[in-house]
Structures are given as C-alpha cells and as structure tokens.
Image (tube, rainbow, N blue to C red):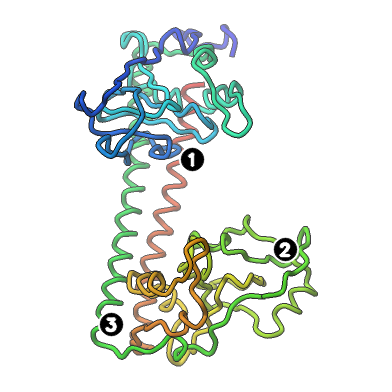
Amino acid sequence: MIERDLKPGWRRVKFGDVVRLSKARSQDPLADGIERYVGLEHLEPGDLRIRRWGSVADGVTFTSVFQPGQVLFGKRRAYQRKVAVADFSGVCSGDIYVLETKDAQVLLPELLPFICQTDAFFDHAVGTSAGSLSPRTNWTSLAEFEYALPPMNEQMRIVDLLGAIDEQVVSVANAIDTLSQVKAAFVEKFISASSESCPTIALAEGCTRVTDGTHQPPTFTDHGIPFFLVKTISSGFVDWTSTKFVSKETYDELTRRVRPKRGDVLYTAVGATYGVALLVDFDEAFVFQRHIAHIIPNPEKLIGRYVEEFLNSRAGKRQSDRCAIGSAQPTVTLKSLSSFKIPLPTIEEQKAFVAELESIAAALGRLEGRLQSSTAIRASALNGVLL
C-alpha cells in the first residue's frame, strides 16, 4: 500500500515504532512469586487465549517475564501462527517474544494482538525467519514490518468489531467442548451401566473374526488403493494424508482372506498409540498393515459402533493397558484382544445407544460448521480492516 491509498487519518508506520519488546527477566521465578510458565506447546494457533500452562514449582529454566495484557508471539516456526494475550503473569520460553505498545495513545494495546494475527504480519515473520529445521525470526526484522495504522477512533471501532467476532468464535468452540464432554460422559455411563446389568463375553465370542492386516511387505505405488499405517488411524479418525498406496492387483491379493468393509472396527495393536479403535464408516477400498487389528462384529450380537466406543472407553483402555507387552514397542496381541471382556447389551439397546450418539454427532457437526464459518468471517474481517 502506498501513501495515497491510505484512508484519511491513517498513516504508515513500522511495527517497532509503536511496539516494544519487553526485556523483563526473572532469574528465580519461584522466589519472585511467579507460579506459571508458558511454552510454545501451550499456545494454540489462532487462539488469543492462553488455556494451558505449566507450574514453575515443577522446575523450569525460562526467565522471560510477562504480565497481563502483554502479547506473546511465537518466534520459532512462525508459520504455526501462535499469538496470545496474557491474562496472568508468568515466565515464558525464549522462543516467545513478549510485546507491548509503546504508547496507548498511539496504538491501543487491545489492537496489538490482532495486528500480530494478520496474514501480512505472519508472512513477514516467516519471510524473515532463518534456520532450516527450526526457523526463527528476530526482533530487528519484526520491528521493520510496515503497516497502516488507523486513527484512535478507528482503532476502537476495529477492536470492538474483531472482539465481537472473537466472542462468537469462542462461544461456538466452548459449545463444541461442552457437547464433546456430554458425549464422553454418555458413553461412560452406558458402558458402566451395561457392565453391571448385562452379561459379559469375550470379544471374540461376539465377532465372526478378530484378525490383523497383511504380514506381507507389499510393493508400494505412487497412487492406487490406500494402504493404512498405524499413524493413519491413531488420532481416532482416518488421516488420508498418512497412507501409502498399492496397486489394484496387490489389493486383490492382500484381501483374498478377508476384505475390510463398512461396520468393521480397526484397532491399533502395536506402538506408542496402541489401543485406538476406529469404526469403518466409509465404503472406499483400503488395506492395512499387520500392526492394525481387524475386528468383524457378529451383527446378531454386536454393533460395530458400540465395539468402537467400548474399546475407546476407560474400561476398554484399562484392558489394553493391562494386556500390552513390551516397552519399546508395546503390543496388544490378537489373543489378548480376542479375550477382552465386553458387556453384551441387547441389539435393541445397542441400537438405541448408537442412535443417541448419532444425534450428538449431528449436533457437533452443525456446531463445527458454525465454527468454520465464524473462523472464516474472523479471518476475512481481520485482514480486511487492518490491511
């Protein structure tokens, strides 16, 4: 933007002209009465609130002090877009810059975090970062970032607008968190009640098969049928970007014995993320490695969604933890998995349970759609009014 493009009252400034890098330090935070510390891992991309932190009493080497109202900006891997406003005092990682306005009559402190969240600011931070494995920007470079500073009355209007949108985003995000907790509580209550009132059987007794993926090392291709690895499903959903591929001929060969289908359950049986169950609720063809177990429920006894929820419940996790062998590469063997004890509600009770879960999932889907919409509006407004 050149000078003649600026609105009346706006002026071109450098970031360092109106923003100060705080250099407050504490060599002994605990003795100075500081209780919390914040690392990069505690900051969430796109979220201006600090929702997690560590305890200084547990031991920390951080010395950079921040106070309520100051802005924390992650200078390492700036592309992660980590910016937050402190609402408590603490110390933070050296990979976090503590920023504040030099003069509140020139730049509203409430506007600073929004400036730090604009695409232009992040582009500048990333573009001035050095290092290949862990790139970092520096204050000298950030201070040179140029942008259009509105007059004070316009700053107030922008803060009110973006603040209102932020509240909407936070409100929807909180609703999602609350409903997710409701879902988790509903699942645990149903499984706990079923454990007390229903017969219990070995998992294998309620299934037509409990097996695993291919033991053959296949020849991979650049495209074709997805080949699932443990990391493909270890987050509780299918990460289609974390698959390999095999040809149709290899797929046909590997699935001659049994072919996964909708309603089956996959289970991570080996590795640090063992014990994660995932219902196959899609029809796309795929095949998977032997470190993933394949559970095929008997439809007369068990519904796949119920099996998934049970294995992911506290009761299911206790059994997987108890049965896992080995430390470097924990493994739940097929024999152990087959012997897992699972309550056996009637099919009608399982269907009612699944129907309630689907109702909650639909509500969550609607909220997540609203969150995406609100987040898009926020991004548009953020860059629209400050660029």
Image coordinates for residue 263, horizontal then vertical, percent: 52, 79
Q: Is residue 359 left or right of residue 304?
A: left
Give, as a three-letter code, the residue at label 1: Ala
Local secondary structure at mark 2: strand
Quarter of the rendering occupied by the N terminus: top right
**How dense is the environment of label 3, judged by Cα within 10 Å: few (below 14), some, or many (20 and up)?**
some
Mark 2 = which residue? 245
- Give the amino acid type for the residue marked by disc 2 in the picture: Phe
Where is residue 183, by image quadrant?
Answer: bottom left
Residue 146: where, in percent of width, then height?
A: 53, 13
Return the residue at label 1. Answer: 376
The nearer-to-camera label among 1 and 2 is: 2
Question: Which of pointers 3 and 1 lies earlier in the amino acid sequence?
Answer: 3
Seen at 41% across and 64% down, the residue is 362
- Above or below residue 103? Residue 296 is below
Mark 3: which secondary structure? helix
At 35% from the left edge and 71% from the top edge, which residue is drawn?
318
* Residue matched to label 3: 195
Identify which residue, 378 or 27, lies in the foreground: 27
Quick check: 376 above or below 114?
below
x and y percent of residue 295 in the render? 52, 80
State which quadrant residue 359 falls in: bottom left
Q: Which mark is residue 307?
A: none
Horizontal arrangement in the rendering, residue 246 relative to residue 306 (left or right): right
Report the residue at 54% width, 22% height from top: 137
Real-space Cα separation, disc 2 to disc 3, in angstroms? 41 Å
**Residues marked 3 and 1 touching at CB (< 8 Å):** no
